[in-house]
Image: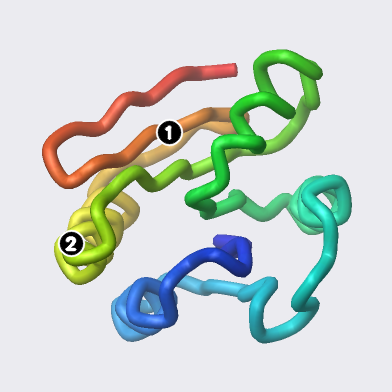
Amino acid sequence: MILADENIHSFITKTLRESGIEVVSVGEDAQGIKDQQVIAWAQEKNYTILTEDKDFGEWVFAHHIKDISVLFLRYSFQDFQLIAFSLRDFLLNTPLRHPVYVTLTTKKIRIRQL
């Protein structure tokens, strides 16, 4: 299951849900919570964090937060539809071994096992 950070465009969550991917949204269910709370929620429920926030990379790599997977989106705002479809296709076609840190752009995907 995906835990979409509150910075994730609603079109992206809608696209994923319409494709049968389960998505819980911080923006819909717990707006305003801190990154540490998002991490705790993801750890507790075994969710993969979907975010545009570079701070989650810092939490994973610099602070060595364990047992979470992160999908980090990097794109220009005008490409929000393209990134939504790229993410959907990636999630539907790529089995992930957790924990993992994935950086997804409109042109490439970088997967790092943690």
Q: Is residue 1 visible?
A: no
**Mark 2 → mark 1, Cα distance in angstroms:** 18 Å
Q: Is residue 8 visible?
A: yes
Q: Which residue is mark 1?
A: 102
Q: Secondary structure at mark 2?
A: helix
Mark with earlier residue (2, 1): 2
Q: Position of residue 67 (x, y in %)?
A: 75, 31
Image quadrant in which you'd find residue 82: bottom left
* Image: 109 above or below 50: above
Q: Position of residue 45 (x, y in %)?
A: 79, 58
Q: Position of residue 103 (x, y in %)?
A: 38, 34
Indicate left or right for 5 with 92 as reference.
Answer: right
Q: Which mark is residue 66?
A: none
- Asked if disc 2 and disc 1 are in contact, CB closer than 8 Å, the reply is no
Q: Amino acid at mark 1?
A: Val
Q: Residues within 10 Å of mark 1 (few under 14, many from 20)?
A: some
Residue at 51 percent of width and 18 percent of height: 113
